[in-house]
């Protein structure tokens, strides 16, 4: 039994969870830091127009993450289940399908955004004073950067599916560190301002993608994760399992983009400073979001592997341990952000009006921390165990079906300042539904583990 198989099958659950989760959380936090770095360095120009432009452009960039999740998380879930059943050929074909399909789709997406930008950006909230800044940003980040951004994240999911969590974390973190280093060089040194931030992000993702390509080439004789296009296949439910497996995460991210676009449109009608404040608030909230995403992405292969291999007891223990870690952090994040909202916003920009809006929005949005963490975990459980209906329902509840109507209603009846409450309210409603779905499922899995009579070392 090699080290990776030992990790999935025999390693004490708490240690296995930490082994998979810690590198992923660290890489997500570094990614979050470099996302914050863009806003931070742009904010130091003390120009609310450029901060607002980055905020307006963000849904288009987040859509790239949605594509990465469609093929990366879907592929990782499929590969882990294949390995749990000993189907190495199907695992290899799944990796090839996920990689090459993601590459083609990302190229098409970049071309579409380039052609649609003049009509699309005003819809997203770009005004006369921010349009040029928006276009400069999305050209480098979304048009030129589509392929490396999608492949970087997709490959990190794929290598994590085989237990290479540390290497996956390093690759993602590499892109984050490079972006932090390159941002001031391009923004201030080369005096490119917001365009410089975009170029720095594109180059960072390109270098991170190259790291994964080199890693997989060196491991080509010992890993089932292959990029060989000759192994590309759609048979044995490879295409459907990957696309359906990644669909909840894709749906959630795309609905998040739609939700953010509606939010931006409502806020930008108020003032540029309000838009800049909201952009900063949402970036700050990414701390809890990044940890929750790192927890779920890290533990998903462990859940999928043990579900496929029939070890439901180990699977349940993995879920419980990860939920406890997630909840502890998210509650702490809520408390810190609520009581230190104003000084945290002031780290990004000194404009008094923008700070006033930003700290108000932070105090509202921070209530997403606990609900987001648990919702992401529940969705990951259902993705790993092929419970697709539940995953889709929760994804749609979290973003799109509830928060957009609430935003419009709050804006109309209570004023734009109340719009920020729509996301926390809808997310907590989704949490209640998630628990009603998860608890019976875990009870069912527990009964199956008792019938199977399997035993394991828990600690």
Image (spheres, helix red, strand yellow):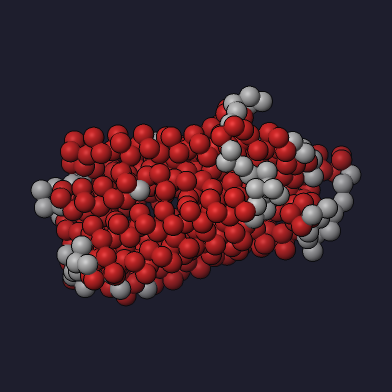
- Specify whether residue 170 is in view: yes
Quarter-of-image position of residue 257: top left
Along the horizontal axis of the image, is 112 left or right of 25? left
- Where residue 245 appears, as percent x and y from the top left, is 57, 36
Q: Residue furthest top?
A: 235
Q: Within the image, what quadrant is residue 258 found in?
A: top left
Residue 398 horizontal side relative to residue 413, left or right: right
Residue drawn at point x = 48 percent, y = 63 percent:
174
266 left or right of 313 in image: left
User: How many numbered circles are shown?
Assistant: 0
Relative to the observer, which residue lies in front, 244 or 438?
A: 244
Q: Nearer the viewer, residue 367 or 39?
A: 39
Q: Residue furthest left?
A: 128
Residue ranking furthest to the right: 453
Residue 177, image x, y percentages = 43, 66
Q: Residue at point 28% right, 73% down?
A: 346
Q: Position of residue 152 (x, y in %)?
A: 48, 50
Quarter of the rendering occupied by the C terminus:
bottom right
The answer to whether 66 is drawn above or below residue 389 in the figure is: below
**Quarter of image, res 235:** top right
Q: Look at the image and tell me whether residue 422 can be seen.
A: no
Residue at 21%, 73% (x, y): give it. 350
Locate residue 17, reporting x and y percent: 68, 59
């Amino acid at each position: 039994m090699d080290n990776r198989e030992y990790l999935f099958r025999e390693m004490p659950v708490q240690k296995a969870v930490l082994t998979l989760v810690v590198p992923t959380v660290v890489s997500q936090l570094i990614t979050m830091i470099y996302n914050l770095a863009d806003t931070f360095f742009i904010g130091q120009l003390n120009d609310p127009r450029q901060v607002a432009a980055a905020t307006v452009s963000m849904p288009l960039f987040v859509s790239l993450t949605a594509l990465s999740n469609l093929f990366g998380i879907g592929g990782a879930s499929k590969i882990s289940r294949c390995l749990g059943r000993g189907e190495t050929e199907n695992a290899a074909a799944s990796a090839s399908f996920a990689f090459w399909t993601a590459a083609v789709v990302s190229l098409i997406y970049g071309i579409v955004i380039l052609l649609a930008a003049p009509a699309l950006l005003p819809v997203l909230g770009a005004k006369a004073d921010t349009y040029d800044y928006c276009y400069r940003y999305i050209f480098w980040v979304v048009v030129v950067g589509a392929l490396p951004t999608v492949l970087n994240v997709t490959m990190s999911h794929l290598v994590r599916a085989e237990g290479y969590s540390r290497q996956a974390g390093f690759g993602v973190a590499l892109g984050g560190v490079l972006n932090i280093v390159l941002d001031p060089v391009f923004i201030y040194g080369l005096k490119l301002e917001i365009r410089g931030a975009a170029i720095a992000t594109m180059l960072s993702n390109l270098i991170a993608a190259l790291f994964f390509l080199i890693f997989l080439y060196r491991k080509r004789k010992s890993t089932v994760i292959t990029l060989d296009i000759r192994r590309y296949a759609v048979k044995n439910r490879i295409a459907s399992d990957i696309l359906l497996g990644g669909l909840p995460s894709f749906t959630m991210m795309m609905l998040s983009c739609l939700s953010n676009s509606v939010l931006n449109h409502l806020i930008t009608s108020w003032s540029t400073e309000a838009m800049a404040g909201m952009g900063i608030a949402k970036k700050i909230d990414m701390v809890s979001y990044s940890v929750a995403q790192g927890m779920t992405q890290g533990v998903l292969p462990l859940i999928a592997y043990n579900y496929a291999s029939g070890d439901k007891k180990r699977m349940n223990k993995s879920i419980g341990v990860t939920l406890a870690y997630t909840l502890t952090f998210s509650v702490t994040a809520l408390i810190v952000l609520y009581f230190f909202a104003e000084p945290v916003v002031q780290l990004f920009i000194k404009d008094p009006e923008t700070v006033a809006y930003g700290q108000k929005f932070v105090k509202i949005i921070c209530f997403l921390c606990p609900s987001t963490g648990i919702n992401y975990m529940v969705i990951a459980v259902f993705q790993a165990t092929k419970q697709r209906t539940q995953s889709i329902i929760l994804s749609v509840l979290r973003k799109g079906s509830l928060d957009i109507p609430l935003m419009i209603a709050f804006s109309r009846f209570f004023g734009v300042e109340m719009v920020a409450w729509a996301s926390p309210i809808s997310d907590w409603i989704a949490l209640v539904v998630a628990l009603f779905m998860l608890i019976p499922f875990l009870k069912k899995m527990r009964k199956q583990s008792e019938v199977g009579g399997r035993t394991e070392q828990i600690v």
